[in-house]
Amino acid sequence: MSDLSASATSYASILGSHSIPTYAALDLGTNSCRLLIAQPTQRSFHVVDAFSSIIRLGEGMSLSGSLSESAMMRTLEVLKVCAAKMKRYNIVRSRQVATEACRIANNGEYFIEQVKQRLGMQIEILSRRLEAQLAVSGCATLIDEECDYALLFDIGGGSSEIVWMDLSKRCKNWQRSLSDCLEAKRCITAWTSLPTGVVTLAERFDTNNVDHVVFQQMVQYVQELMEPFEAKYKLRHCIANGNTHFLGTSGTITTLAGIQLKLQRYDRNRVDGCWLASLDIRSVIRQLLNQTYDQRIANPCVGPERADLVIAGCAILEAVLRTWPTKRLRVADRGLREGMLTTMMAEDAQKSK
């Protein structure tokens, strides 16, 4: 019997012979709010319910330093939906986190307290380090165990995480199971959180009508933020002399994958785990740059909610590719929520041994 099956059996004995434990993970980001409710399976988990909504909690914050009243109110309305969904299930364990917007806003703590008072939700403001660790945990099963190193990047709304992993530090091979998330965290040797994401970068530059000149300025700005990390850890040297697995997780990279695959509607099953050549990524970026704002809206993989942000995400991705060149990378339509779920399930599986 696997560790995870043992865990499920242990819970079943407590909750009833036909009960399977249900977990919940909520990610309150700068741009979106996402909820995932799932039950463990032998190697992974089965999604019971999922919900996602663009909230733009951090809208205007780069100028004001505070969460606006309108952003907080619309976020509260979305959180009401999440709270109602969570109440429908017999959840044995949950984790609800907020990231960059609430981390740096002058009134971030105030907003979290308002959420607690009004909705009874206990949301923790996640540190940048934990955010990076959980993103790795959520993507661990996509990492090629034959590689020497892995570079994971997560382009968020208010910040972008870069994680460097030395795969020689793992204690055992990947099992393609939830236990991989605990192994993956052991391999993290360097990480950084850049103080820019798609929302903050879009507010810094006019991304509705950006041209190639402005795009290059955006890329250069992000590259300058990355250089201290590169100077300290010299990843370019390791990449040039070893076999490195590149893994991207974010709405930006999944959107570009959907466009490259010519999807008429977004399909997670086709995007998650697919590989993109750097040449193809840059071809899609050029395509988006040459489109008008309305043309980007008409793209089924972009739409009105991402039309003004996708160019900012492209600039961050291009900065990654220029700083750490690679011929291809793998796309992950998973990240923080999946990391929270897999970590909770793996920890409970170990306790049940």
Image: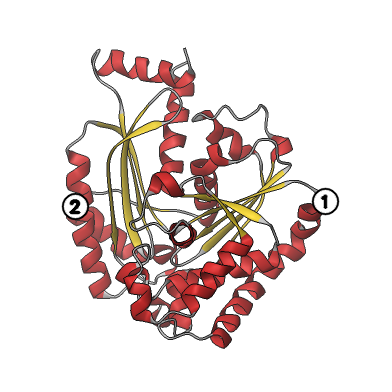
Horizontal side, residue 100 vs residue 297: left or right: right
* Dot 2 amino acid type: Val
Q: Would you identify the image quadrant in which residue 15 lies?
A: top left
Q: Which residue is drawn at 68% across and 57% down?
A: 327
Residue 81, disc: 2
Q: Within 10 Å of the Cα at label 1, are there few (<14), some (14-19), or many (20+) other Cα atoms?
A: few
Horizontal side, residue 294 vs residue 217: left or right: left
Is the residue 177 above or below the residue 250 in the image? above
Residue 258 visible within the image: yes
Q: Which residue is drawn at 56% across and 84% down?
A: 212
Query: Between marks 2 and 1, how big is the CA–CA gap?
Result: 49 Å
Residue 166 appears at what percent x and percent y? 71, 43
Is the residue 38 above or below the residue 216 in the image? above
14 or 227, nearer to the observer: 227
115 or 253, nearer to the observer: 253
279 or 207, nearer to the observer: 279
Q: Residue at x 60, y 38 (%)?
A: 184
Residue 57 visible within the image: no
Q: Within 10 Å of the Cα at label 2, are there few (<14), some (14-19), or many (20+) other Cα atoms?
A: few
Horizontal side, residue 88 vs residue 206: left or right: left
- SS at mark 2? helix
Answer with mark 2 or mark 1, whichever residue precedes in sequence: 2
| Residue where numbered disc 1 is placed | 241
Residue 214 appears at what percent x and percent y? 54, 86
Residue 332 appears at what percent x and percent y? 49, 49
Horizontal side, residue 69 vs residue 289: left or right: left
Mark nearest the camera among 2 and 1 is 1
Is the residue 40 above or below the residue 203 in the image? above
* Dot 1 amino acid type: Asn
